[in-house]
Amino acid sequence: MREFLRQILTSKWSKVAIFLLALLPLAYLASRAYHGQLTANPVEFVQHFTGDWTLRFLLITLSITPLRKLLNLPDLIRFRRMLGLFAFLYVCLHFLTYIGPDQAFSLSGMWKDVAKRRYVTVGFTGFVLLIPLALTSTKAWIRRLGGKRWQALHRLIYVTALCGVIHYYWLVKSDHRIPLLYGAILAVLLLYRLAASLWKPRSAVGVAPPLKPSATS
Amino acid sequence: MRNFGDLTEADITPKSVYLNRRQILRAMGIAGAAVVGGKVLSNLVFPPATVNAGTKLNVALKSPFSTSEKMNTFDDVTHYNNFYEFGTDKGEPSRNAGKFRTSPWTVSVEGEVKKPAKCSMDDILKLAPLEERIYRHRCVEGWSIVVPWIGYSLNTILKLAEPTEKAKYVAFQSYYDRGQMPWGDHSGIDLPYVEGLRLDEAMNPLTLLCVGMYGESLPNQDGAPVRLVIPWKYGFKSIKSIVKIRLEKDQPATTWNIYAPREYGFYSNVNPNVDHPRWSQATERRLGELLRRKTLMFNGYADQVASLYNGMDLKKYY
């Protein structure tokens, strides 16, 4: 069974499958748009939809390391950078709905808003912190930075995810169930890392992705 | 006016009888079966309301207060609702309010009045000729719509009740029944929903006692069977599904002000110069438009209402 799973996870098609799966939300959004089902407030709908999927992909990305250990499936690492890049794709779309329809592409308006509104400040911070991670997501950059430094840099995703949850919590009016759910999942994922590092301080918790050449690269 | 003064408690008991029966059945400890049985029974005794769902109304007058701006579609206005008793997502009320029982319905006018009354919806529909008023409606969240409401000025019913000398404010209360509105448990706000106006605000002819829209009675998710529409204030002041109108000496508590006093004031007049602590109120998105438009002082009704606030610091009394 485990061998079978391993074979699936390491097959070159699994990456393609995950890639297509990660595009499904976007396809769903496009089909709703095509059928005129973006609600009475399409801008808000797209904004919330892309924001939601940003958070979901951040949490999925962060769950790879615990799942690798708990399920003893180290090959899951093959999908981590791609999933992180999908979080970046959805946050870029999210940001576009903000800078476009909300700010009418006015940079000065955006800066004023970012400086004044704490939920925008924190959301914008999370977005900006994700940019260097997206830029250094290639194998060439892992080599250039070296595994340890690359890994240290990419821990910024913890901050981005935290920013994302706070951003959501601060903009909700009174029903905080969903942002709290995201927050709880994030807490579990981060506490796992803390516990793992305390438990086995010398062992490598969440090592940088292996650079062994794979069939799909 | 027959309805003011000479209506007795007995005239409006059906609702309480219905509620009591349900409570007794629940108390018998067969909750599951009783709830189902209670529903069947109640549907037999009181057929589900159709009176207040999509009945054509006779609109006698067009109002000079109406705007000529492009109206939003009926579909928009019935599928994008803030009605936390039926869920906090704007799509939820249209899905969850379908079975809301709005008949029989009684509105109690009470407190500092010489002629308290319990009005049925029939009474309310006959108090004055119905007008259509096309108002701009601005939500505190930063979106707006244009809606052809139907009703008449709230002052009609207040004058009939004859406020006493002591009356300075009007408090309003929405219907609330956890059985019919289980979503309210997760709303984060205290229910029943309560709102309030200063008496002069309530007497201003713009303040509409609203029973319909788009030529028909109000859909459940839009506040059936009777609500307020106060076009120069943020939408949450326009309380839905009203069961109580109480004249008071002191400023009444209001739901969103209780929840977050720094964010939602008692007045909550639309004001582009006073931001919500978390977001700007300078602009709004009219549903159906891509870019945001500038928000107008008092939502564009300054000519009619600015004088109500002469000498008041609107940054302090937000």
Image: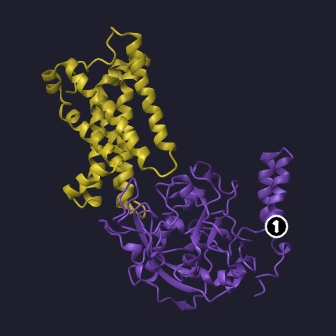
Chain colours: A yellow, B purple
| A56 vs B147: above or below | above
Residue A176 x, y percent position in the rendering: 50, 45
Residue B195 x, y percent position in the rendering: 59, 65
Q: Quadrant of residue A10?
A: top left
Residue in view at x 28 percent, y 50 percent = A114
Residue in view at x 26 percent, y 52 percent = A96
Q: Is residue B308 left or right of residue B293?
A: right
What amino acid type is highlighted by mark number 1? Answer: Val
| A122 vs B49: above or below | above
Q: What is the secondary structure assignment of the residue under circle 1? A: helix
Residue in view at x 55 percent, y 62 percent = B94
Q: Is residue B203 left or right of residue B47?
A: left
Which residue is more in the foreground, B158 or A157? B158
Letter of the chain that mark 1 sits on in the rendering: B
Would you name the residue on which mark 1 appears? Answer: B45
Q: Quadrant of the C terminus of chain B?
A: bottom left
Residue A45 x, y percent position in the rendering: 39, 56
Q: Quadrant of residue A14?
A: top left
| B78 vs A169: above or below | below
Q: Furthest-front residue in view? A: B311
